[in-house]
């Protein structure tokens, strides 16, 4: 009998708590700079969509690595003749010049292009780096 009484008392208290809640208002207190930061972020996002360059993490295919600077630029010219629409990037990390091509968002895209390049180049590698998208 005590258990029934105790259970009933707990049940009544729970229902009383549920019925005691009322609708109210929420007061939001925030720094005014938050709105300016949100507006700036939206502006940057719109600028990226409208045609300006956007930098993000992606992949490039390395087609040349060597000590000779002139050879790197020669390979770049040959590549541009074969694939005029694909961007090329030459970098120098002592003691090698590296020629990397393309701006691929996924590794799969880079691998497909790398398979196409196998007819012209022997040593090809895919690297993850920051790419430029239009």
Image (cartoon, grey):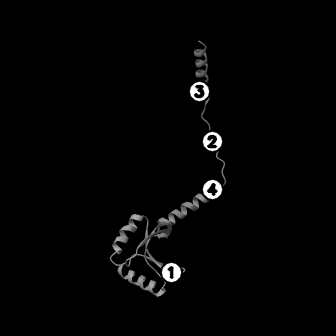
Q: Which residue shows up at 59% across the image and 27% down it?
A: 19
| Image-quadrant location for residue 74 | bottom left
Q: CA distance from mark 2 to mark 4?
A: 18 Å
- The residue at 61%/32% (across/down) is 22
* Alpha carbon distance from label 1 to label 4: 46 Å
Q: Which residue is mark 4?
A: 34
Tag shown at residue 35:
none
Q: Nearer the viewer, mark 2 or mark 3?
A: 3
Q: What x and y, as percent, mark residue 53?
A: 49, 70
Sequence-first disc among 1 and 2: 2
Task: Measure the alpha-carbon separation of dots 1 and 2.
Answer: 62 Å
Look at mark 2 in the image and give the residue it sits on.
26
Look at discs 1 and 4 and give the one toward the viewer: 1
The circle drawn on residue 96 is: 1
Above or below for 8 versus 34: above
> Which of disc 1 and disc 3 is earlier in sequence?
3
**Category of crowding for the residue at label 2, using alpha-carbon neighbours closer than 10 angstroms: few (below 14), some (14–19), many (at least 20):** few
In the rendered image, residue 56, in percent from the top left (x then y), is placed at: 50, 66
Examine the image and state in which quarter residue 99 appears. Answer: bottom left
User: Tag 4 or tag 1, which sits nearer the N-term?
Assistant: 4
Per the image, the residue denoted by label 3 is 19
| Disc on the earlier residue, 2 or 3 | 3
Mark 2 in CB contact with mark 4 (< 8 angstroms): no
Residue furthest to the top in view is 1
Most foreground residue, 123 or 114:
123
Residue farthest bottom in this picture: 70
* Helix, strand or loop at mark 1: strand
First reached walking from the N terminus: tag 2 or tag 4: 2
Task: State the separation of the CA atoms marked 3 and 4.
Answer: 37 Å
Q: How far apart, in angstroms, are the residues tagged by discs 3 and 1?
A: 75 Å
Q: Identify the mark nearer the N-term, 3 or 4.
A: 3
């Amino acid at each position: 009998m005590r258990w029934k009484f105790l259970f009933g008392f707990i049940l009544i208290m729970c229902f009383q708590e549920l019925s005691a809640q009322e609708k109210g208002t929420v007061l939001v207190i925030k720094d005014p700079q938050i709105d300016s930061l949100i507006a700036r972020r939206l502006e940057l996002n719109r600028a990226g969509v409208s045609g300006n360059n956007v930098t993000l993490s992606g992949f490039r295919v390395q087609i040349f690595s060597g000590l000779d600077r002139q050879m790197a630029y020669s390979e770049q010219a040959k590549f541009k003749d074969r694939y005029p629409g694909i961007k090329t990037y030459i970098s120098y990390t002592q003691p090698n010049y590296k020629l990397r091509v393309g701006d691929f968002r996924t590794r799969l895209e880079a691998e497909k292009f790398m398979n196409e390049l196998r007819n012209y180049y022997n040593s090809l590698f895919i690297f993850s780096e920051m790419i430029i998208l239009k």
